[in-house]
Image (spheres, grey):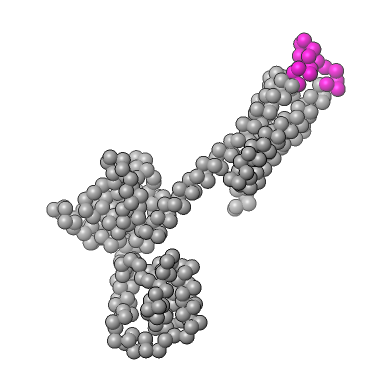
Amino acid sequence: MKHFHSVVVILLNMFFCIALLWFFTQNAYLRPYAGSATKEILAGLLLLTSLYANYFVFYPMLYRKFPVLYWGIIVIISLILAGMEMAISCSRTIHGNISLTADGEPLSLFFKSLLFVFGRNLAFILVPFVIRNMQHLREEADTKVQFIYRQNRLLDVCDKNHTCHNIPIDDILYIKKNGNYVYVNTIDGAVYTRYCSLKYLEQLFGDEEFIRISSSLIVPYQYIESYDEKQVVMKKMPYSKEPLTFNLDSPKSKQVVTIIADHLQMIQTESSENELSDETNPMLDKKILSIPPQEKLDAVYAYIQSHPDSRSNEITSVIGYSQSTIERCLVELRKQGLVEYVGSKKTGGYRAVGN
């Protein structure tokens, strides 16, 4: 399917190049007709080659490190392509001793057309440059936002005075969409705005802590008090007289209820496991008397380094050691100051100290 998509994109680009060249051939002052469909297609392929060369080679390899060299190469390539295209287009006319203008000035028209073709090629090459640069800047911004979220569990928002803030993820009560903005409501009654889509926030948060219960609403699992197939009731906040109630979208209400039920059940199970595996548990104290082998400590530590916010059951399923061995390793690593538990019991996990 991926290869089919690539082929379709290339064919569409070829069609666009040929259509663009056809438009320019309609006016002999811009560029005379090449004389055959084959030559027109060849000229179109030259333009298409420059587009892909810039998009996949020159821009990513040169622009960030050598911008002056990049612009020089783009100008030279545009000029060479313009000369090749004009050579293809004018060969039939010049060799046939047919005047390119009514005044019989073929050389003047050649350079005039060359200037137009050069400008067109330069502009055509710069279109993907602009698109690629905008995409690169957007990816950089998304990376910074994800870093802030994952490392500090903060979301950047703005208040009504357009002042930017980073609010804790755990303080979000619900997020509601309105037009091109989302309104982030916190447990203390404050309301912030953010210019993005709910889909973007879904991807940022993941599905471990938040759920989209309607087309315009996201809520965290930890503040859900009760639910049925018609509505979700949130926990009562100190600033409100009654708990908030949100209606579910009818077509997906059963699916949403099932997901909420499964997730809350999983949270309760994990909470019970954490209580049983707590360091103050007498059964665990007996196991702690024997320190795990160094290779097991190294394996658990290496996994936590490469997978921040890991939980004990996750480490057990991946590494293959028993749950009790993993718990002993975690306790020992915490004693040595190599790992720490970050976050709440329900949603937190282990991280290497200093990461």
In the displayed image of the protein, which residue is found farthest to the left? 241
Residue 36 located left or right of residue 313: right
| x and y percentages locating residue 223 in the rendered image | 25, 60
Residue 72 located left or right of residue 276: right
In the rendered image, residue 104 lying in the magenta stretch gets the answer: yes
Quadrant position of residue 203: bottom left
**Callout count:** 0
Against 82, residue 138 (above or below) is: below
| x and y percentages locating residue 250 in the rendered image | 31, 52
Quadrant position of residue 107: top right
| x and y percentages locating residue 113 in the rendered image | 71, 22
Residue 292 located left or right of residue 215: right
Q: Is residue 11 visible?
A: no
* In the foreground, 148 or 10: 148
Instruction: Please give the name of the residue rendered at 67% of the width and 24% of the height, measured from the top-left corner.
Output: 116
Query: Which segment is the magenta one?
Result: 94-110
In the displayed image of the protein, which residue is found farthest to the top? 103
Residue 226 located left or right of residue 88: left
Instruction: Please give the name of the residue rendered at 65% of the width and 44% of the height, measured from the top-left corner.
Output: 58
In the rendered image, residue 335 lying in the magenta stretch gets the answer: no
Instruction: Please give the name of the residue rendered at 76% of the width and 14% of the height, measured from the top-left corner.
Output: 101
Q: Is residue 309 visible?
A: yes
Image quadrant in which the C terminus is located = bottom left
Quadrant position of residue 222: bottom left
| x and y percentages locating residue 204 in the rendered image | 41, 55
Against 20, residue 196 (above or below) is: below
